[in-house]
Image (cartoon, rainbow, N blue to C red):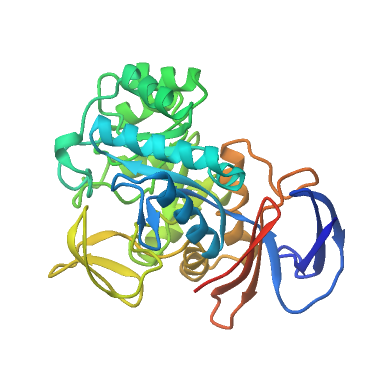
Amino acid sequence: MATRVSGRDPETGQPRTVVIQDGRISDILPGGPDDGLWLSLGLFDLQLNGFGGHDLNARPDPETVRDLATAVHESGVSRFAPTLITASHAAIIDALQAISQARDSDPLVRHAIPFVHIEGPHIAPEDGARGAHPAEHVRPPSLSEFDAWQAASGNLVGLVTMSPHWPETSAYVHGLQARGVRVALGHTSARSDQISAAVAAGAILSTHLGNGIAVTLPRHPNPIWTQLAEDRLWASFIADGHHLPPETFKAMLRAKGLERSILVSDAVALAGCAPGIYNVPIGGKVELKAAGRLEVVGTSILAGAAVSLTFGIATARRMAGLTLAEALRLATINPRMLFNLPALTVGAPADLLRFRLCEDGSLAPETVYVAGRPYPFRP
């Protein structure tokens, strides 16, 4: 039996109705009931380390992954790429197997998780650029290690973030490209020629540009300028109001263009949790503040991102003066386009977000649809 979901189109402001049949979009019609709610393509988060207390980087089991998927859906996101950071070879293998088993146990989890993002372990070893990644597990890129990841997970890794300073970079990027895997650049202090060589080899994305980099940089050249100027690179941004100042975010968006920019949450496990002081595996004793800022206790150092992608969309609008449709594009259409996944069209999976637009510009999700299944929003 067909289900009809109506809401205002963010592009036009006019009501439209999406017809869902067997988990897919069977028709998109103009008009429909107008109760003041908006209807968009479902959000797709390319970088998510955890949410609601569920941590992908603390030796997860399949149940943790399934619970995480539910928490992510209830935050307003339809699909996401579980993100594993730098760790031992055994820990990465264990996490990949847990994610793979969770996908095998539930077709909706399989749909929600199209691939895994490995952020590291081939990153810059020095403080600053390395971020919160453990120094003892940073290591050079290795195709044999990558093939072991794929063997353990059933070819589940679809995106790898690395620093292009390693001598093995070009061979590694070529190898991943030949295997149908995207390569992103991040957590780096690489020279301009090293970045350019990685892009020539096939790297396609800058991971959370402006973060995962040294605190002090030369005026020029530096890794930010080089990546901003490289038209073959897309860029993802953390728009939580803490990782990038408004003027920096606005300038970076202008440089990359809305057509090559993506919003990510980069959320850690404490995202969606109550404010307070916590002890966490990465960062130690941290404080989650009411505004969503996560700091190492006693310092002003960020300990990760801790807000939802819906929060990031509203913050991006405020920081860069984006329209609703522009901000949504960065978290819906663009990440799908980079991975050749269908968007809001007949025959595509019915991944939708129905939400209320508040007076302060924030989004209040009402229902998220995952392959046609509705999940009520839980603040």
Asked whether the viewer can see residue 50, the reply is: yes
- Residue at 48%, 26% (x, y): give it: 155
x, y percent for residue 343: 69, 46
Q: Nearer the viewer, residue 319 or 22?
A: 22
Residue situated in front as seen by the camera: 72 or 294: 72
**Dividing the image into 4 quarters, which one contains the N terminus?**
bottom right
Task: Determine the residue positioned at 64% across, 75% down.
Answer: 356
Q: Which quarter of the figure has residue 191? A: top left
Asked whether the viewer can see residue 185, the reply is: no
| Horizontal side, residue 326 vs residue 82: left or right | right
Residue 252 or residue 143, whichever sits in front: 143
Horizontal side of residue 83 vs 332, given as left or right: left
- Tell whether 113 sits left or right of 350: left
User: In the image, is residue 263 above or below residue 220?
Assistant: below
In the displayed structure, would residue 123 be above or below residue 145? below
Left-right relation of 346 to 91: right
User: Where 143 sits versus 117, above or below?
Assistant: above
- Residue 124 in picture, x, y percent from top left: 22, 36
Say which residue appears at 41% left-offset and 67% top-offset. Answer: 272
Q: Where is residue 36 in the image (x, y as percent from the top left)?
A: 73, 79
